[in-house]
Image (spheres, rainbow, N blue to C red):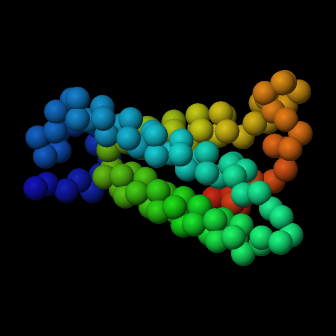
Amino acid sequence: MKTNITFFWGNTTEEQSVGSYMLDLSYVFSLCMVIEWLSHARLVKSSSNDNVKAGLLQTLMYGFRVGLAYLVMLSVMSFNIGIILAAIAGYSVGFLVFDRRIFRGSKIVHDHMDGPADLPPLSCR
């Protein structure tokens, strides 16, 4: 098996078909969309008497998001330009859809959704 150490374009690794390559691209795109959804989601209802449950749910969501981000990172490390572009597109479209700033002033977003997200933003530290 040949391992690429430079960027390449195509589906020529491991006798991969075009259909399988398109499935890989859509998989990476979808993973990035889910990561952006988790980054902007407001799923944890905070109440003063149930902080432990809310904290455990937030921790579970954080761990799931980090695990998905590592899967995307491993995919990008294949050095396939199509995979890299699918990841960038997935993160970008996910940000556009789930950030909600684009919908301010419309009837889609309600006042209770304008608070901070459950998880801190993804960042490279």
- Position above or below: 97 against 106: below
Residue 39, position as x, y percentages in the image: 65, 52
Residue 48, position as x, y percentages in the image: 86, 69
Q: Nearer the viewer, residue 124 or 44?
A: 44
Residue at image location 36% in from the left, 37% down from the top: 25
Q: How many marks?
A: 0
Return the residue found at the far bottom: 52
Residue 16, position as x, y percentages in the image: 16, 39
Residue 78, position as x, y percentages in the image: 31, 52
Side of 100 where 48 appears, left or right: right
Side of 34 where 24 appears, left or right: left
Please state, as top left, top right, bottom left or bottom right, where the N terminus lies in the image: bottom left
Q: Nearer the viewer, residue 100 or 46?
A: 46
- Position above or below: 121 against 27: below
Dividing the picture into quadrants, the one containing residue 77 is: bottom left
Side of 22 where 119 appears, left or right: right
Please state, as top left, top right, bottom left or bottom right, where the C terminus lies in the image: bottom right
Residue at image location 46% in from the left, 46% down from the top: 31
Q: Nearer the viewer, residue 118 or 88?
A: 118
Residue at image location 85% in from the left, 35% down from the top: 110
Residue at image location 61% in from the left, 45% down from the top: 37
Dividing the picture into quadrants, the one containing residue 60 is: bottom right
Whether residue 47 appears in this view of the structure is: yes
Whether residue 123 appears in this view of the structure is: no
Dividing the picture into quadrants, the one containing residue 71 is: bottom left
